[in-house]
């Protein structure tokens, strides 16, 4: 039984899972909306929302925030977009920056699909 196991392993090791979330986060920040499986979208949501919260409250220690976001995303273009565009857009919002919309199952393997996008 998987009591108190919050992390979905997604059938991957820890490093593979970290790289997958990093890649999905970069794509979401770059395009604003991506299509993926429901399990991946549900894992991606808190990962991205914590970064948006950091990006919008970067007034007091901007350099430390930028370095933290760079370590999480490993992509300078995504960090610049997060700080200049996405963070200020949600300045007056206290959370809930993304939404997950369910799609029909994938025909090849029957996986539950979803769209995750910024609100």
Image (tube, helix red, strand yellow):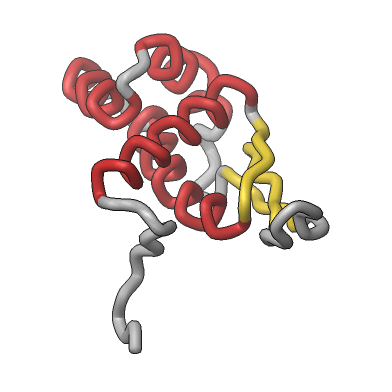
Q: Nearer the viewer, residue 43 or 85?
A: 43
Q: Is residue 98 left or right of residue 112?
A: left
Residue 53: where, in percent of width, then height? 39, 39
The residue located at (56%, 31%) in the rendering is 28
Q: Quadrant of the C terminus?
A: top right
21 w.r.t. 106: above or below:
above
Residue drawn 32% across the image and 86% down it: 3
Q: Is residue 8 above or below residue 27?
A: below
Q: Give the side of residue 21 with respect to residue 39, left or right.
A: left
Q: Residue 33, position in %: x, y?
A: 67, 33
Left or right side of 8 for 86: right
Quadrant of image for the N terminus:
bottom left
In this view, the residue farthest toward the front is 108
Q: Identify whether 42 is placed above or below 20.
A: below
Q: x, y (%) of residue 114?
A: 69, 52
| Quarter of the view holding residue 118 | top right
Which residue: 54% across, 43% down? 93
Where residue 102 appears, as percent x and y from the top left, is: 75, 57
Q: Count numbered badges in the picture.
A: 0
Q: Residue furthest bottom?
A: 1
Task: Identify whether 34 is placed above or below 7.
Answer: above
Q: Quadrant of residue 64?
A: top left
């Amino acid at each position: 039984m998987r009591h108190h196991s919050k992390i979905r392993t997604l059938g991957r090791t820890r490093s593979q899972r970290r790289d997958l979330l990093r890649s999905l986060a970069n794509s979401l920040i770059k395009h604003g909306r991506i299509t993926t499986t429901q399990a991946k979208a549900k894992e991606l949501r808190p990962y991205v929302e914590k970064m948006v919260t950091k990006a919008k409250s970067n007034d007091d220690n901007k350099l430390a925030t930028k370095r933290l976001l760079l370590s999480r995303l490993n992509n300078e273009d995504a960090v610049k977009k997060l700080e200049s565009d996405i963070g200020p857009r949600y300045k007056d919002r206290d959370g809930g920056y993304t939404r997950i919309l369910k799609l029909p199952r994938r025909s090849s393997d029957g996986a539950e699909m979803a769209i995750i996008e910024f609100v």
